Amino acid sequence: MPHVIVKLYAGRSDEQKQRIADAITKALMSATGCSEGAVSVGVEDVEPSAWTATVYEPDIVAKAETILKKPGYAPP
């Protein structure tokens, strides 16, 4: 039962978010062999000014051992 939460800068349209969810669903189905019904995807908007405190530090830095694709940036 894969569940993915995507956090991204606020401002994407509902259509863009749906395309993201659809692409992630297909990728998980392909990589794990699970069915579409087993996948859930959430999309959370984050204001750019809040990114470091609400995403980068708690989800990336604090969980570095779980990050398989590391970001190519560091916050200012």
Image (spheres, helix red, strand yellow):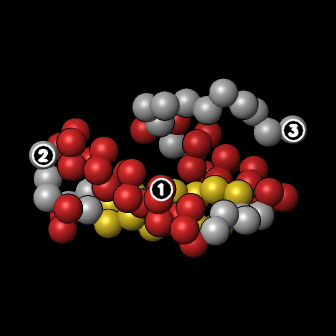
Q: Position of residue 26 (x, y in %)?
A: 29, 50
Which residue is found at the position 64% from the left and 68% from the top? 13
Residue 60 in the image: above or below residue 70: below
Q: Are marks 3 and 2 in contact (CB under 8 Å)?
A: no
The Cα–Cα distance between marks 1 and 2, rounded to whole angstroms, is 19 Å
Label for residue 29?
none
Label 3 to label 1, Cα distance in Å?
27 Å
**Which residue is painted at 58% across and 42% down in the image?**
60
Residue behind mark 2: 33
Horizontal side, residue 27 vs residue 54: left or right: left
Q: Earlier in the sequence, mark 3 or mark 1?
A: 1
Type of the residue with mark 1: Ile
Tags 1 and 2 touching, CB below 8 Å: no
Which of the two discs, 3 and 2, sits closer to the camera?
2
Per the model, the C-alpha gap separating discs 3 and 2 is: 40 Å
Identify which residue is drawn at 39% across, 51% down: 23
Residue at the far bottom in the pictured view: 14
Type of amino acid at the residue the image marks with label 3: Pro
Which quarter shows the N terminus?
bottom left
Q: Secondary structure at mark 3?
A: loop
| Crowd band around label 1 with a 10 angstrom C-alpha radius: few (<14), some (14–19), many (20+) | some
Q: Residues within 10 Å of mark 2 (few under 14, many from 20)?
A: few
The C terminus sits in image quarter: top right
Give the percent coordinates (x, y) of residue 72. 66, 27
Callout 2 amino acid: Gly
Secondary structure beneath dot 2 equals loop
Going from N to C along the chain, the mark reached first, 3 or 2, is 2
Q: Which mark is residue 20?
A: 1
Q: Which residue is mark 3?
A: 76
In the displayed structure, does residue 14 sit left or right of residue 3? right
Of the residues tagged 3 and 1, which is closer to the observer? 1
